[in-house]
Amino acid sequence: MSPSSPLPKTAAQFLLLAGLACASAQAQTEADTLAQGLIRLRGEVEQLNAELNLLREEQRTTLAGLNAQKAELSNSAERQALAAREAREKLAAREAEIAASSVDGDSLQPLLLAAIDALQTHIRSGLPFRVEERLAELDQFRTELQNGSVPPQRGVNRLWAFYEDEFRLSRDNSLQAQTIALGNERVLADVAKLGSMLLYFRTRDGRVGQAVRNGEQWTFAATDNPASIQQITTLFDALGKQIRQGWFELPIAQTGAR
C-alpha cells in the first residue's frame, strides 16, 4: 500500500478509540486530583471549625469567670459601703449624744472609749491591712484619754481623724509593705490594697497570693496557678508605676461563710 493510500477503516477506528481512551484517562486523573483536593479542603475546614468551636468554648468559660468576679466585687463593694455607712452613722450618733447632753469631760470620756472599741472591732473584721499598727494607734489614744494627757474635749477631734483615716483607706488603692503570717512563718511582703475589698501580697522570695476570709478570720494564701501569678504580678507592676486606676483581671479566692 502506497503512502498516499487512506488507512483502512479498522485502523482508523482503532486510533479513534485509542484517542478517546487517552482523553478519558486524562479526565479521570484530573477528576481524581480534584477529588483529593476537595477531601483535603474538607479536612482543613473541619479542623478550622473544631478550632473555632474550641475558641468559642474558651471565650464562654472566660466570660463566665469574669461575670463571677464582677458579681463578687459588686457584693464586696456593697458590704464595704454598708460598713462605712454604719460607721458614719455610729459616729454621728455619738456626736449627737455629746451635743445634746453638753457633757463635761468625765461624762464624755466613756463615750469616746466606747467609740474606740467600735472602731477597733471594725478594723479587726476588715481586710488584714496593717491591722496591728492601726490598733496600736487607737490603743495609744485610749491610754492618753485615760491618763488625762489628752482632754476628752480634744479627743473628739482626734477620734474623728481616726474615722476619716478609715474612710480614706476604704476608697484608695495603694502599694505598701507589711509583715504577714504565711503558713507557719511571718514574712515581710509588699501588699497591694484595692479599697477595702481586695488585698494581694508578694513576698521578697517571689511568692504571691491574696488575703482570704474564712468566717470571721483572715488568712494569707499563696497561689501556684500560673495565670493568677501573672495577674497579681501585673497589678504590682502597675501600682509600682503609680497607676492607680485601670482594668485589671485578678483572681478572687472563694471565701467562707460569714
Image: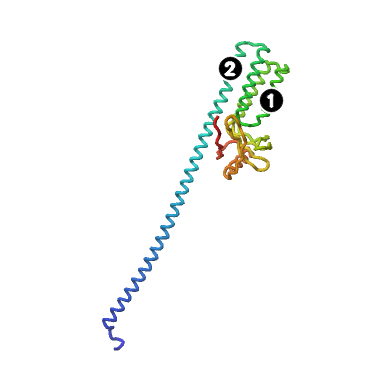
**Reading the chain from its start, which is encountered first: label 2 or label 1?**
2
Q: Amino acid at mark 2?
A: Ala
Q: Amino acid at mark 1?
A: Glu
Do labels 2 and 1 touch, CB within 8 Å? no
Counting labels gives 2
Q: Position of residue 8 (x, y in %)?
A: 27, 83
Query: Measuring 55% from the left and 27% from the top, which residue is drawn there?
Result: 81
Q: Residues within 10 Å of mark 2 (few under 14, many from 20)?
A: few
Query: Measuring 28% from the left and 78% from the top, which residue is drawn there?
Result: 13
Q: Position of residue 49 (x, y in %)?
A: 43, 52
* Residue highlighted by disc 1: 137
Q: Quadrant of the C terminus?
A: top right
Q: Nearer the viewer, residue 100 or 209?
A: 209
Distance Cα–Cα, label 2 vs label 1: 23 Å
Query: Measuring 66% from the left and 40% from the top, which residue is drawn there?
Result: 203
Q: Position of residue 171 (x, y in %)?
A: 59, 30
Q: Tell me, for residue 93, which label it has, or none.
A: 2
